[in-house]
Image (cartoon, rainbow, N blue to C red):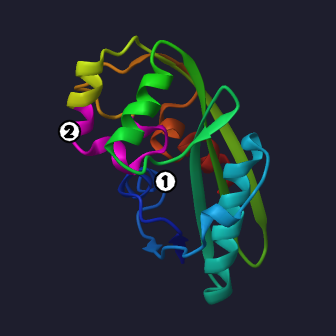
Amino acid sequence: MYILASKSPRRQELLKMLISDFAIEVSNIDESLINDEPYNLSATLSKVKAEEIFKKHPSDIIIAADTIVIHKNKVLGKPKNNLDAFTMLKELSDDVHDVITGFTILSKDKCITKSVITKVYFNDLSDDLINKYIQTGSPLDKAGAYGIQDKEFPLIKKIEGSYYNVMGLPVEELKKCL
């Protein structure tokens, strides 16, 4: 049986593109205790999450993922509050950043950990647009304080790489590994 180690509704939706039947079990690791270089962090986090769930389910196939935003070598996680979200979005405005999703597939027969990087170019965002977007509540549970799928807000100019990676699960690469 497949187990997705994530409570993210976006990851669940994306995994359904590849696997129709899977269970969900959320990892309880304290991500703040995991340190690594910014470009390795999401892969390391995904592996730690997968290993925690695998201990309880050694006969199953565990899929774990973690998505981070890196802007000017600084990791932008999920915002703590509306002000934090505003600060992040203002920082990303009219600039480019990397979205990295690390994923791990762990079973008794194999362990694959990979990262996928997508470059995201933001439009020049007005304070009014940022505030309206924050009022939807959408930015508060997303790395970098935004969701690429939030089409009603023109945040993104263009991307180079996987759209699904920015959503939280690089299904193209994951499919190759499954």
Of residues 59 and 10, the one drawn nearer to the viewer in this rendering: 10
Q: Which amino acid does label 1 sit on?
A: Leu
103 inside magenta stretch:
no
Task: Check disc 1 and report the residue beneath it.
Answer: 18
Q: Give the range drawn in magenta.
A: 133-147
What residue sits 53% from the left and 15% below the top? 95
**Element type at mark 1:** loop
Number of the front mark, 1 or 2: 2
What residue sits 61% from the left and 71% below the top? 62
Q: What label does residue 81 carry, if any?
A: none
137 inside magenta stretch:
yes
Tell me the chief SS of the magenta region: helix
Callout 1 crowding tier (Cα within 10 Å): few <14, some 14–19, many ≥20: few
What residue sits 41% from the left and 41% below the top? 84
Callout 2 crowding tier (Cα within 10 Å): few <14, some 14–19, many ≥20: few
Residue 131 in the image, given as x and y percentages of width and height:
25, 29
Report whether 89 appears left or right of 101: left
Task: Check disc 2 and report the residue beneath it.
Answer: 135
Q: Which amino acid does label 2 sit on?
A: Gln
**Is residue 152 depicted above or below 61 in this figure?**
above
Q: Quadrant of residue 86?
A: top left
What residue sits 65% from the left and 60% below the top? 46
Residue 14 in the image, given as x and y percentages of width and height:
43, 50
**Is residue 110 depicted above or below 44 in this figure?**
below
Of residues 18 and 119, the one drawn nearer to the viewer in this rendering: 119
Q: In which quarter of the image is residue 24?
A: bottom left
Looking at the rendered image, the quarter that the C terminus falls into is: bottom right
Of residues 68 and 93, the one drawn nearer to the viewer in this rendering: 93
Task: Please tell me which of labels 1 and 2 falls first in the chain.
Answer: 1
